[in-house]
Amino acid sequence: MNSVERYNGTPKLMVPAFGIGILGLVLTAVGAFVGDARAAAHSYLFGYVYWAGIAVASIIMVAVFHTAKAKWMTVLRRAMETMAISVPIFAVLFLGLIPALKLLYPWVPESPLTSEFTDVQLHHLHSKHGYLNVGFFYARQVIYFLVWTFVSHRLYGWSTRQDEGGDLMLTVKQRFFAPGSLPFLALTITFAAFDWMMSLTPLWQSTIYGVYYFAGSFLAAFCVLTLTTVNAQGKDLYGNLVTTAHYHNLGKLMLAFVAFWAYIAFSQFLLVWIANLPEEAPWYHVRIFGGWRPVSIALFFIQFLIPFGILLSRNLKLQPRKLAVVAVYLLIVHAVDLYWLIFPAYNSEHPSFPWTIITAWVGVGGIAVGFALFRARGRYTVPVKDPYIADSLRYVQP
């Protein structure tokens, strides 16, 4: 471990990431002012929930591994922690959603979207005013970001402080704190999914929706971790310390969450189909019987059958470059999944693909990646004095 030095930042990555991110956000704003403002608003929401979900899933990932007292992932943990501490930038990026609330959510006062509602639907919508009102919506966002920021910085702070003195009590603190944080993380990501996406269609509800969003985001977080690890080769980086056994585990986790996503997706569909309630069925009716049907059918194949079959291969999971290709594929498919969740609220007749969806995704992603690299400066890329780092470096498949 003496060969690992502090990461001093990579201007060739960080500066372009910020530059591309700013350019993407500016172009999205231009699209909102000179083009279709509703399309730009939905595009920004799409980019936001994509990258924010990965950041929050990374916090949960770190907490889960501490709770499980897993040793094998110690060499990978700093990368996960760095992904997790990017959360504060999403509190700033959330400000971009505020001017767009009326264009996104029918429950916002004076929203033009309510003109499509019948009197009965307006009555039902009014009955949800206690929860779906702007003031309480903002208050919930504050709670979410306070919880996410506190947990991520607490775990990251103890982890990086241990790099200096190797205090074993810091490991004890992390492993004591992490299990208690999980219920709060689970609740906040669930209600964030309700607020950000499910309330696009406020007369529909599903208690599984938050788990669905978590499943896709958790899978995407493992894919980002895999890509980061494969490309973290060179001076002061941790990729050279990672063995094929670690990659094998990452591949198995990707396989597990491909299956978990499919299970949650089918569970939600099955419950709605069996109940066949008039306030629940329309959400799926739009996606199954209209112009969105091809996307719905494609998701079954591209997000479950194809990656599940590919990731069954043990040899593939032992080859980092091939596993990275699968990770890129799954990140693209995750984008399709979120598109399927969000954009029927913009156009229920058929899929539409405004150019702002690309600029918003690149813009939010560029800012998030740049901020994460900025936060990593001056730190080791592995927890060099963690008591289990030697076990992690020696890890072999049981």
Image: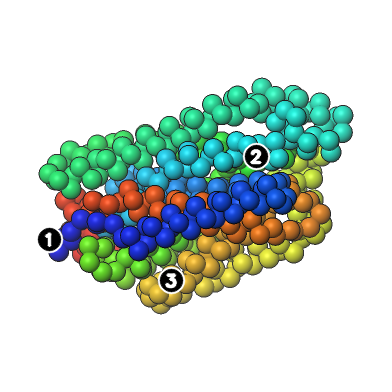
Mark 1 vs mark 2: give the one in front: 2
* Disc 2 target residue: 100
Residue 220 in the image: above or below residue 103:
below
Are the residues flagged by discs 1 and 2 in contact, CB closer than 8 Å? no
Q: Quadrant of the C terminus?
A: bottom left
Residue at (55% x, 51% y) in the render: 25
Spatial distance from mark 2 to mark 3, Cα to Cα? 38 Å
For the residues labelled 1 and 3, say whether their Cβ atoms are less than 8 Å apart. no
Point out the frontmost of discs 1 and 3. Answer: 1
Could you tell me residue 60's position as x and y percent? 41, 45
- Callout 1: 10 Å neighbours few (<14), some, many (20+)? few
The residue wearing badge 3 is 323
Left or right placement of residue 104 versus residue 5 in this view: right
Dot 1 lies on which element? loop
Q: Examine the rendering and report whether any part of residue 231 can be seen.
A: yes
First in sequence, mark 1 or 3: give its number: 1
Residue 55 spot, x, y in % from top left:
44, 48
- Provide the residue designation for mark 1: 2
Question: Circle 2 — which element?
Answer: helix
Residue situated furthest right in the rendering = 119
